[in-house]
Image: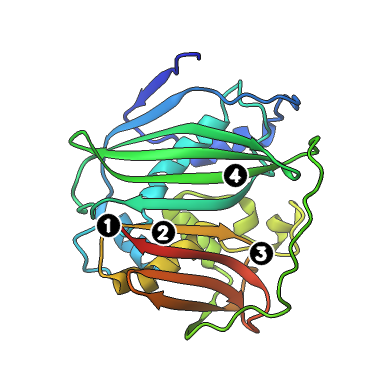
Amino acid sequence: MSQSSRVLISKSPGTLDQYRRALLSKGSKTKTPKLPSTRITLRDTNVDPKRIAQYADVCGFEKDSNALPITLPHLLAFPLHLELMLQRDFPFAVMGMVHVRNEITQYRAIKSHEVMDVTCFFSDIRKTDKGFDIDIKTQIHISGSVVWESISTNLVRQKTDIAPSEKSKEPSTLPEQPYKEFWQLASDLGRRYALVSGDSNPIHLFSLSAKLFGFKGHIAHGMWSKARIAAALHSKIESDACTVTVEFKLPVFLPSTVQLNYDMKDKEIEFDLRDEAGIKPHLKGSIKAL
């Protein structure tokens, strides 16, 4: 096993320059891809109170909390994820990758003033009939202890030697849940989230820029959807220590109206996000107290 290389940085990379580099990345198109073993750590960082307030505003969290919203640390990790994928020995092109799953585990609430070390690295690659699933793991340490971690899974669509699996027949209608909320999403939601998150992927900003990448219009960030759901449901399990998992399904085009459906079972909530008619699933997931 090759020893991983460790990169320590004191300032987060600029995402605009990263997207410029991503547009030029092509990947090696090898049939036996191998992921870089680099671990990148952003040392001694914290979150500006203004950014916390802006994030809370756009995602629906309470603004007077002394703790970071559970999904906010992803903003610190995202530029490191991009930097990992922009390494010369990363075998795939960055543009076109699809974020298909995200799991966050928080072991305790992170106070808004606390200083953190954020470490990101590739943790797994799996070949499927659709291409390759790539996991990036993030760990946040405070005073040497892991307080927050996540696994972000990205799909690289590519032909493989795995035969397509037979899809199980899904019901024509999604199951009814006892609780439901409707949210109206404005056309500028993607631009507002991009300003606070740094994720300025063109598919989220304007209809015209999204069409250049094959979309019929611009779409909401998947991690905004997860954050908005966490803002609505996290307090209901009455535990700061929890795991929030989502699987992303169909994109949310902007503007639109969506419905959150959920069911509460003891210290666990199962949820899904659907279109206004309740027919098309945008994502599904759960929140479980540890």
Q: CA distance from mark 4 to mark 3?
A: 15 Å
Mark linked to residue 199: none
Q: Residues within 10 Å of mark 4 (few under 14, many from 20)?
A: some
| Residue identified by numbered label 4 | 154
Q: Secondary structure at mark 1?
A: loop
* Residue 27 or residue 272, whichever sits in front: 272
Callout 3 touching callout 1 (CB < 8 Å): no
**Could you say which quadrant of the image residue 6 lies in?**
top left
Image spot of residue 165 (x, y percent): 77, 51
User: Few, some or many C-alpha atoms within 10 Å of disc 2 (few <14, some 14-19, many ≥20)?
Assistant: many
Of labels 3 and 1, the one closer to you = 1
Cα gap from disc 2 to disc 1, whole angstroms: 10 Å
Above or below for 183 versus 251? below
Element carrying mark 3: loop
Quarter of the view holding residue 160: top right
The quadrant of the rendering that contains the C terminus is: bottom left
The first of marks 1 and 4 along the sequence is 4
> Can see residue 14?
no
3D distance between C-alphas at marks 1 and 4: 25 Å
Residue identifier under label 3 = 250
Q: Is residue 247 left or right of residue 213?
A: left
Marking on residue 241: 1
Pick whichever of labels 4 and 2 is earlier in the sequence: 4
Q: x%, y% of residue 87? A: 56, 25
- Say which amino acid is labelled 2: Val
